[in-house]
Amino acid sequence: MTFLWIAVILLALLAVVDLIAGVSNDAVNFLNSAIGSRVAKRRLVYWVAAGGLLIGSLLSANMMEVARKGVIYPSAFHFTELMVVFVAVMLVDIILIDGFNTMGFPTSTTIAIVFELLGGAMALSVIKNHQSKIDGIELEQMVNTDKAFIILAGILLSIFLAFIVGILVQFVIRIIFSFNYQRRFKHLFAIMGGIAITAIAFMILKKAIGDNSIFDSYSWYSSVILYQSEILIGIFAFSTFIFLFLGLSFNVDIPRIVVLFGTFALAMSFAANDLVNFIGVPMTAIESFKTFLQSGESSPDSFSMAFLNNNIIRKDIYNDHVYTLIFTLSAIIMTITLFRSKKAKGVTETEVYLGRQSSGYERFEPSYLSRVIVRNFLHVHNMAIGILPKKVVNFFDSRYKKAETTDAQTTVDGVIYFDTVRASVNLVVASLLISLGTYMQFPLSTTFVVFMVAMGTSLADQAWGRESAVYRVSGVLSILGGWFFTACMAFIGTFIFAYIIWYGQWLAAIPLTLLVIGSLLLTHKYHKKKREEKRILKEEFQIEIDNNLDHLMESGSEQIRIHLQEASKVFYLSMQGFIDEDIRQLHEAHNKAQLLDKYTRDGKSKYFYAYAKITEEGIDSGQYFVQAFDYLTELAGCLLNITQPLFEHIENQHKGMTQSQKQDLQDLLDEVSGYFNHIIHLEKEQKFELVNEMISKQNFLISFQDSLRRNQIKRIQKGEGRTRVSILFMDVLAETKNVLLYSINLLKAHRDFVSSYKSNNPSSI
């Protein structure tokens, strides 16, 4: 009984943690469209979603039965056996989902819970067959293998179906409305908006009253069932009239309302479908424990779980206020997570970035498969262009032509990554597919459906242009691969954990729980470190806000200063780490150099984009800024050329420098560190009149470096220097010379930019 008490308490606590981790991952499903199109401030979007979460939680009773008998046959288990499986499931689920959250990867919590239950049941089947002296028990008696394969087939089918439907619908909608739909198509938008609201209402209707065993005791239920068609027609007529009135009278952006309404509906759908993934197992365990205590049975090892075949929650949810309280508290926890979770924002940003209309910084590196897919797609596209009549091609091109304004717009709450038309299509198509799957009792993963619809609409909107296609395709393939990785790790992890817990009981459950806590602490620390790196290096360059010299002057100057400070830190860490042969310090320096190189190169392209859009009067001033970022990029490349060989040398356990080499390098480090400090101070205070003084300092350092090189050559001639480290020493001196040259050129280019800017803008002085 000790294990059972500990297991029940653990499951209750783990339910809260799993709920937070799960919502942090799945929030992207219903926030993606609203956040990407910026239909409202983020807080308003969260409150709209919170309303959907609350209602959806109260409608999730039907899905709660999946944890009881959707994947496994409870009658094949005794109480202790099932508790072992449940504890293993929850521990693995938290580790797995939190890991994906930390990396900013959306994954399917439905896949996770299904394969975790399969893995736990498989472990118990192997154990029972091993311990049984007779025939034992077959896996088919414990696991609903038919249901499991149907779920897997449904998920695979939904990937292609959602993607294709998203492409086709978005293509048709874009041909109708084009990108220049503002203040136009009021009547057509009203009709399309009415259709969208009706489609979403159909989904809500199916979610809310789809299971007549819940509502059949209510008098209004039969009327709603009888007049479903009339209700939907009435919703279409009313919403169309309202949209037409608002559009003609107040020039309201109708798709914006559709997106907010769709966000509410998808949040409700998420809570109704996926809440079981987080609290279904703990609720089943608590209900089982309560039934066991009431039964008067003395041994949990012989207490059958066949009673779980009864729809307990579905029957009692509206009569037992405890269930209502649990679901309400779950909605509150999910809402708080929406507002507070940093990881939820990271997961949302990943999906929004993959679907954004403009090019720029890409989070995924191209893979061989993504290059092959893009190459073949372009080949087919060129063939289609050659076959279609010229007039048809020109018509399509005209519908995709954008206004002469900037590609990306902004609001107070951030950058608009795609318009409200595409956001509306994302929500409506995803809602219809999910409701259709529910209506046909076809298993779907809401994460798969929503994500693949969003990717399909972005492809149809030509968001995946030649500049970004290989990166976006690589990102989609990575996330799809992550989902299948989730299935494998969920199955294997739970199989192992169930084995350990079965033989170790509570003595194993507690250490495994501590392992989960340690994992959460490590991922929190890692995620915090990554957020800090983004903050320091300003990954999110807001070049879309001001494409003018003022923007280059303020934001660009700050970037140069921050990157110079980071360059100084990288140089110091790498040199001192090599002198001390400190592998950890060299590893840190190498990581920082890689980040600096990545962000400076990306910043260069973004600021060049901004420079390309400034007025003709600012071209002369802007060219100095472009030069400055060129030198900054080269400086970062030199630092990477220093840190990488130094790190590899020590990592490979090669011999370090001689004492005389260490002393020379220490003297060089002291001089260059002081040089960097002076440059950073001059740049920050804009004391550019002292540039000539810094040039003299640079010349001195180059001469000093030449003397160190001569010393090294003399050591080699005397046979004192070891070949490998001597070559590395000479390479470091050469790259340090480049660092000195590029840094002073950077300072001079920035000086010229500031001087030119002030001469053209006397009011700024």
Image: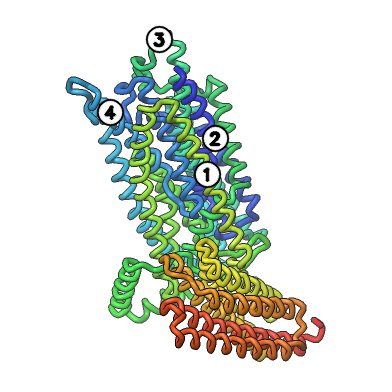
Instruction: Please give the name of the residue rendered at 47% of the width and 57% of the height, measured from the top-left corner.
Output: 425
Residue underneath mark 1: 520
Residue positioned 44% across, 65% down in the render: 651
How far apart are labels 2 and 4 at the CA level? 30 Å
Q: Which mark is residue 16?
A: 2
Q: Amino acid at mark 4?
A: Ile
Q: Amino acid at mark 3?
A: Ser
- In the picture provided, is 556 more to the left or to the right than 486? right
From this view, report whether residue 180 is shown above or below residue 325: below
Q: Label 4, secondary structure: give it.
A: helix
Q: Amino acid at mark 2?
A: Val
Please name which of the two marks, 4 or 3, marks the residue nearer to the observer: 4
Spatial CA distance of label 1 from label 3 is 37 Å
The tag earlier along the polypeptide, 1 or 3, is 3
Residue 499 place in picture, x, y as percent? 34, 32
Front residue (pair 587, 82): 587
* Residue behind mark 4: 127
User: Which SS class for mark 3?
Assistant: loop
In this view, 331 is above or below 309: below
Per the image, the residue denoted by label 3 is 298
Which of the marked residues, 4 or 1, is nearer the chain's N terminus? 4
Q: 10 Å neighbourhood of mark 3: few (<14), some, or many (≥20)?
A: few
159 vs 197, left or right, is left
Q: Nearer the viewer, residue 702 or 312?
A: 702
